[in-house]
Structure formats: structure tokens, C-alpha cells
Amino acid sequence: MENEFDAIVVGSGISGGWAAKELCEQGLKTLVLERGRNVEHLKDYPTATMDPWEFKHRGSMTREFYEKNPLISKAAGFGEDTAHFFIRDADHPYVQRRPFDWIRGYQVGGKSLIWGRACQRWSDYEFKAPAKYGYGIAWPIDYKEIAPWYAHVEKFIGVCGNKDGIEAMPDGEFLPPFELSCVEQHMQQTLNKHFPDRYLVQGRWAHLSEPNQIHLDQDRGKCQCRNLCMRGCPYGGYFSSVSSTLPWAKKTGNLTIRPFSVVHSVIYDEATGKASGVKVIDANTKEEIIYKARVIFLNASALNSTLVLLNSKSQRFPNGLGNDHDVLGRYIGFHLYRGWANGKVTGFEDKYVYGKNPTECIIANYRNLKERDTDFVGGYTIFTGGYRSRTNEVPDNEPQLGADFKEKLTQPGSWYAYMYMQGETIPKATNRVTLSPDKKDQWGIPLLVTDVGYDENDEKMVQDFLTESRRMLEKIGCTEIQAHDNKQAPGLDIHEMGGARMGLDPKTSMLNAHNQLHACKNVFVTDGACMASTGNQSPSILYMALTARAATYAAEQFKTGAL
């Protein structure tokens, strides 16, 4: 393989795939480095069409597996059918100063194969609230700047949803939405009546409800409503870099993908003041390889991109590339997922659902918008919906066998409504990651040390959600309401952000408005590490929009010789 390219992209997931697509379309010879194995669309989805009874353990893992993998087995969507897209706990250890669950998927496609697929746009409230209310720095961009890039991404990946006209969750370029169930329609109408400032809408999800020509040109097809997405979709019904951006980039003839490539560091050239390439450790042979390029994009996921920068030491940058002011590795944020609520819905026994809707409903954030209206800062999105249990509930004091028992199980059970929160957290200098001074992984790279935890603001937000979700479920007419704090450690939300945040001031941020390192202009970071705050919307589509914007800018700068 040639060792010199126009651009190098570290990571092949949601943002790395977009970097590859945009750079290749602009004519740059681009190398994508992926630390995990190769995965090809269709070919490498071994469980995609299996029925439940075809799995040896009916979807569960063995006791031995759970004992060896207490971390990864907690991840949403993990099971016997998806285990091949998650790494085992021992495959990449890290050090936890405070409990933090770091969920990873190392393969071509990264976690784009196992993501939740929610695609709400940030509003200007989220961009401006941290500086306005004093819990973060000012973003160097606003909604108006990123809105065209949201549209650019939405049209290509395919996002279904309604244009609902909600200021806190702007509309986008949507495919037709999935239908609300009868209970969800009841929830929507009831909430509109009793809570005029709260809007329950069909979620904006990266699914091809009705493909457009651009999606057919990607060889993707209509979502079949199987809700088996995390196995890998043979229809290409949901967006992943394996089914969409990477094959698109490959068609240009400008893409090279090298799996089993663990990036050790970015190489800094003291003479030019720029990065000259990256140092790679072959995952299998442990061979060290240097790849050179004029443009480098870090898209290895928030904590891994931060790890690479911290390990990129030179005479100019003894504390990590671009880290002149001890900002690198700090201000780690995440989403608050601790609050859950559920209740039984009376009525609607003559109604059922057909198909397996792969999307959820959303109640847009209603906290601290135009003004601060609570004793905490930030807001929270609520994911919600209605469902009917598949079988009739047979009380424990009744016989659990026999003809009568079987007959009862042939009837569907009760309807339920659920809610769970996705809350904004405050980026703090004390929430940080560092490199272990003495522990290394199997490739000789220092282990990451996580030191991230909750604060008083988080506790207040959880309690507000628990109170308000109970109020809403009561108005909906639910009985047997349960609202609880699951107390899960940070990280299990899989929305880690920060570590190399964007900002206006190089003394308090790592990246400028174009996602360039302030102190090394040909290195761009466009995954979760770049986030200056967490907002309350799902972040993946913002990573994609930021990446498309930065890659277009990088290609322009490359062609003029500025990079």
C-alpha cells in the first residue's frame, strides 16, 4: 500500500464515513484507518435474517460471557444477535477513577452499525444557552450556520419525520414519518390539552420510510419495519457508514480503507508547524507504519480521538498535540439517561399494532428555553411511546400451566406508556480523561484514564423529570405508574462528548469554528470530541453536519495550498 495520501481519516463510523465521502468527492486521495476488522454491507451481517429459535441461547449470552464482560453486556441493544459489533471488555481495557461505562464498537462502520438512529436538530437555544446562563463557553457557530449542513446530511442519509414547527427542535428535510399508534395519538392529544408548552411528536429517525432517488442510487431500500437494525440491515433501510457513505466514497476511486490499524499518534513536523501524518500499529502484527498526508481528520469517537491527541507528543507539544493551555482531555460531557417512567393505559383493548416500528416518539425539551425557569441549567428531551404487551398478564396466584393458561396467553395484554429522559450535562474541567503513566494496551499505547461523574445539576434535573413524567402519565390516564432513577454510571448513554472542544478562544478551547486545531491547522476533529456542550438532542447528526462542513472547508484549503 502507498504510504502517502492527500487526506487521512482516523475512524470509519458515523463522522469518519462523512469525512471520507466529502473529501473523496472533492478529489482528495483519502485513507481511512480503522482499528477493527473489515465489515462489508450484506456480506458481514451474519444474524440479519435469523429467527429467534435459530440462536443457540435464544438471544442471551452464557453465564461465563456475562461474568467476563460485565461492562459491554449492559449496553443498549447488546445480545447474542448483535455481539459481533461490540468489543469484549478485555479487548481494550481502560482505567476508571470514577465509574464510567465506555461502550465501543471496533469495525469498519464503527458504532454506526449499532446506533439509536435518532436525528433531532439542535436549536439555537442549545448553541447559546451555555454562554447565556454561564455554564459553558460560547460556541463559535450557531444554528443559522449549521442549518444548511443539517439539510445536506438529512437529504443523503434519509430522515423520516414531520415538520412540526417546534422552535426547540427545528424541522428538517424529512421523508414521511411512521404512524403514531392509537395510544400515542391519545398521548399527543392529552398532552396538548393539559400542557400547551409540551409537544409529543413522531421522532426524526434515520430510516428510509419512502426512499428518494439519492437513496436508491446508494443501493439502499425501504425500511421493512423489522426493528432488527443493530444486526446490520440487509436492505440498507437505516443509515450506516457501511451501507451509505463509505460505498459512496469508494465509487469515486479516491478511497482506501485499511482495517486492523490502531492509530498511535499524529506526527507533528516542527519545521512546518503542521502535522505530516500518523503513526499506526498494525493490530495483528504489531508493525509500526507511518502514513503521510496534508489533511488529517480525527473521527475515532470522542474519547479515542482525545486519546490520540494526548499521545501525540513532540518538542513543541509535550502535553499532546495542540494542548498549549491544558484544555485537551477536559470538559467531558455525556447525556443524562437516569430517569425512566412507565404506566398502564386503560382502554384500547380492541386495537393492536402491525409491524415493528423502529422509531420512537419525542417530547421536545420544554425547560430553560427563552428564560431559565428551574433550579437547574440545561434541558432534557423525552423519548416516549405506547406499546401493548404481547401476551395477557396471568397473575402469579393463578396456575402457570394447563389449557386455561395457554388460552389466556393467546390474547394480547394491556397497553402501556413509557418515558425516559435524555438530559444535558454541564461540561466541567474536572470531568476529564488522561493517559495512564504506567499502564499500556497490547499495542504499547497508554491506557485511557476516565475521571467523569455526576453533579448537583444532574440530580436536580433527574428529580424534575421524575416529577413531570408522573404528572404527564397521570393526565394521560395511566395507572400503576412507576418513575425511578436507575443510577446508571455515566457513559452507558454512549453519547460521550468533549475532550477537544470548539471555541472562540484558544486558551479555553482546542478547535476553531472550522473544527481545526487552533495550534495545528491541518488537523481537524469532527466527532464527539469537538463538542463545546452536550445539548439535549441526540448528537450524531450534528457530528455528521459538522464533518461535512469541515471537510468541504478542508478540501477548499487543500486546493489553494493553504493546507
Image (cartoon, rainbow, N blue to C red):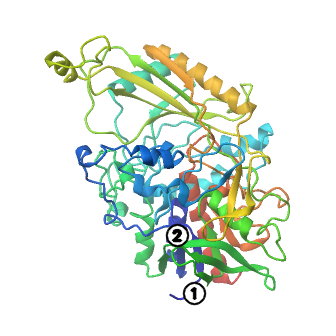
**Badge 1, how many Cα within 10 Å: few under 14, some, many 20+?**
few
- Considering every residue shown, the one lying at the far left of the view is 403
From the image, which quarter does the C terminus lie in? Answer: bottom right
**Where in the figure is residue 404, as x and y percent of width and height?**
16, 15
> Pointer 1 and pointer 2: residues touching (CB < 8 Å)?
no
Q: Which residue is mark 2?
A: 34
123 or 291, which is in the foreground? 291
Instruction: From the viewer's perspective, tell me whether residue 212 is left or right of residue 465.
Output: left
Q: Amino acid at mark 1?
A: Asn
Label 2: state its secondary structure: loop
Image-quadrant location for residue 3: bottom right
Q: Which mark is residue 143?
A: none
Cα separation between marks 1 and 2: 15 Å
- Which type of secondary structure does the marked residue at label 1 adopt? loop
Q: Which residue is mark 1?
A: 3
Tell me: 273 left or right of 178: right
What's under tag 2, amino acid-wise? Glu
Percent across and percent down for residue 541 are 53, 53
Q: Residue at x 70, y 26 (%)?
A: 460
Q: Which residue lies at the image location 59% right of the left edge and 63% below the top edge?
A: 300
Residue at 77% x, 72% y is 313
23, above or below 151, in the image:
below
Q: Quadrant of residue 252?
A: bottom left
Assess disc 2: are there few (<14), some (14-19) or many (≥20) residues with their C-alpha within 10 Å of its C-alpha.
Answer: many
Q: In the rendered image, which quarter is residue 282 located in? A: bottom right
Q: Is residue 563 visible?
A: no
Tell me where residue 543 appears, x and y as whole percent: 58, 56
